[in-house]
Amino acid sequence: MIMTTFGFSIEEAEVAPGTLGLLYDDTPPLTTADVKPFVWSILLFRRAVRACEVVGAITAVCAHSELYSGWSDFLEDDDDRTRLEYLVDEVIGDMTAQGLLCYDTEDDLWSLQLGKNNRNLPEIIKAIAGTGGSMPQHLLMELN
């Protein structure tokens, strides 16, 4: 049995995550539509999410260019977020504006809310159906 090496060391893999070949990145740029399923998966699993958890989940599959700070000339000088962090903040902000999430300053968590008279239930059911999942136990207990 002959063992061959392909010349792809761990250091090179760390430099170019999400690539299809050595230093050739064919990963499309992220959009908020790409980020939203990651947010929903964490919310449906445990009902609360931190932005850093979503960033950590996406980092393994995103393009390396998504992880650079200073990616836009339109950002303020003191804004050192990466493009990925910016997109995650956008999605969480939109969900908060819709009333789906409520921010807990003490724990730095965004929590999923059913809303007054369960007004967010249709949106939650759409997310569950879209992921092929089931209603989380914590939401079932709150509904009863």
Image (cartoon, rainbow, N blue to C red):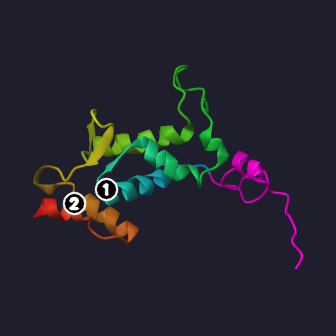
Magenta segment: does it hold 59?
Answer: no
Of helix, strand and loop, which mostly describes the magenta segment?
Answer: loop
Residue at 74% across, 52% down: 10
Front residue of 1/75: it is 1
Q: Within the image, what quadrant is residue 105 found in?
A: top left
Classify residue 65 as left or right of residue 133: right
Q: Secondary structure at mark 1?
A: helix
Front residue of 63/144: it is 144
Question: Where in the figure is residue 44, as x and y percent of width and height?
Answer: 32, 59
Magenta segment: does it hold 21?
Answer: yes
Q: Locate the C terminus by quadrant.
A: bottom left
Q: Which mark is residue 111?
A: none
The reply to whether discs 1 and 2 touch (Cβ–Cβ < 8 Å) is: yes
Q: Secondary structure at mark 2?
A: helix
Q: Locate the N terminus by quadrant.
A: bottom right
Q: Within the image, what quadrant is residue 110 found in?
A: top left
Few, some or many C-alpha atoms within 10 Å of disc 2 (few <14, some 14-19, many ≥20)?
A: few
In this rendering, is residue 72 above or below 45?
above
Few, some or many C-alpha atoms within 10 Å of disc 1 (few <14, some 14-19, many ≥20)?
A: some
In this rendering, is residue 75 above or below 92?
above
Question: Where in the figure is residue 117, as x and y percent of width and height?
Answer: 10, 54
User: What is the total number of numbered labels drawn onto the structure image?
Assistant: 2
Q: Which residue is mark 1?
A: 46
Q: Amino acid at mark 1?
A: Arg
Classify residue 73 as left or right of residue 121: right
Q: Which residues are magenta?
A: 1-28
Classify residue 11 as left or right of residue 68: right
Residue at 26% across, 67% down: 135
Q: Which residue is mark 2?
A: 138
Question: Where in the figure is residue 34, as x and y percent of width and height?
Answer: 50, 54
Residue at 70% across, 48% down: 14
In the orientation shown, which residue stands out farthest toward the top? 77
